[in-house]
Image (cartoon, rainbow, N blue to C red):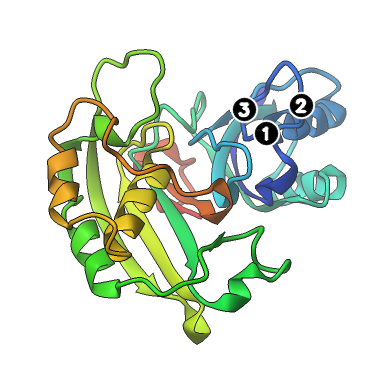
Amino acid sequence: MSRSFLALLHFDGTHFLGWQRQAAGRTVQAELEAVLERLTGRPVRTNAAGRTDAGVHAVGLAVSFAMPERWTPPELRRALNALLPRDCWVAETQAMRAGFHARKEADGRRYRYDIGCDAASESPFRRRYEWALGRPVSAELLGASAAMLLGEHDFRAFAAKGEPKPHYRCRVRDAHWDPRPCGQGMSFHVEADRFLQHMVRMLVGTMTDVALGRRPLGDMQTLLHRHDNQDTSPPAPPQGLYFVAARYPAACFAPDTPAQAVA
């Protein structure tokens, strides 16, 4: 017999090609599944709440998988952390309802994007983990840009080209910028029911151009009515982006586990 688990995964995305397993190259999914196979003696399939790109980090990526029933959440967390590489770490494991799927059952996801606006953002101890912009931006214009994103919109203009999708609508529940400590820059916080590929990075790239005076604030509203990304600013670099949390309905959790934003 097996039971479903959810693991909250932190990882430094610098040396990964992203979450999803690929034919060649190092990925977070392949590393985690290799460890789970060592623990069980058989292949274990994992599913994550989101698919991060190369260079993107996580401080709470929700990942689901099934393990033999004998495992308890604390024992599983200790075993995973003993075997995972040093750029991955499991913050928590939880027992979930049978058949739980981290991607299909998430009803919310949260990301953060960090911009370094001071000269010290170019430090080798920072530039792997933020956009080392190195110049001031208008906090007022960033805030006004983010406020336009709230609610349900078609985000086709902020999505990478790829296979056609049934729709491009996302419901944004929170979108705001906060100053980072010690004058280091700004952080963008965004939560939505779903995100399109490169959506957060393209939003940040465009909002930053507005905040630098490179394009008018009204462009944000205009782009939300566009059906292509031809006039959208280039995406912000991947190293400033973090997957922060996923949210699940109460019915997803085992009876003794409270529903929560998982991060």
Is disc 3 placed on a helix, strand or loop? loop
The answer for how far apart the CA atoms under marks 2 and 3 are is 10 Å
Q: In front here: 234 or 37?
A: 234
Q: Which mark is residue 143?
A: none
- Are there few (<14), some (14-19), or many (20+) residues within 10 Å of tag 3? some
Q: Is residue 201 above or below residue 160?
A: below
Q: Residue at horizontal 50%, vertical 64%? A: 133
Q: Residue at x 49, y 40 (%)?
A: 254
Q: Nearer the viewer, mark 2 or mark 3?
A: 2
- Residue depicted at 22% across the width and 41% down the height: 171
Q: Which residue is mark 2?
A: 25
At label 1, which amino acid type do we have? Leu
Question: Which residue is identified by label 3?
Answer: 20
Q: Look at the numbered discs 1 and 2 and tell me whether their residues touch, using CB distance below 8 Å.
A: yes
| In this picture, residue 126 sits left or right of residue 213 | right
Residue 92 at x, y percent in the picture: 63, 53
Picture coordinates of residue 205, whole percent (x, y): 38, 50
Which numbered disc, 2 or 3, marks the residue that appears first in the sequence? 3
Q: Which mark is residue 17?
A: 1
Does residue 132 appear in this view? yes
User: In terms of depth relative to the viewer, which is nearer, 205 or 92?
Assistant: 205
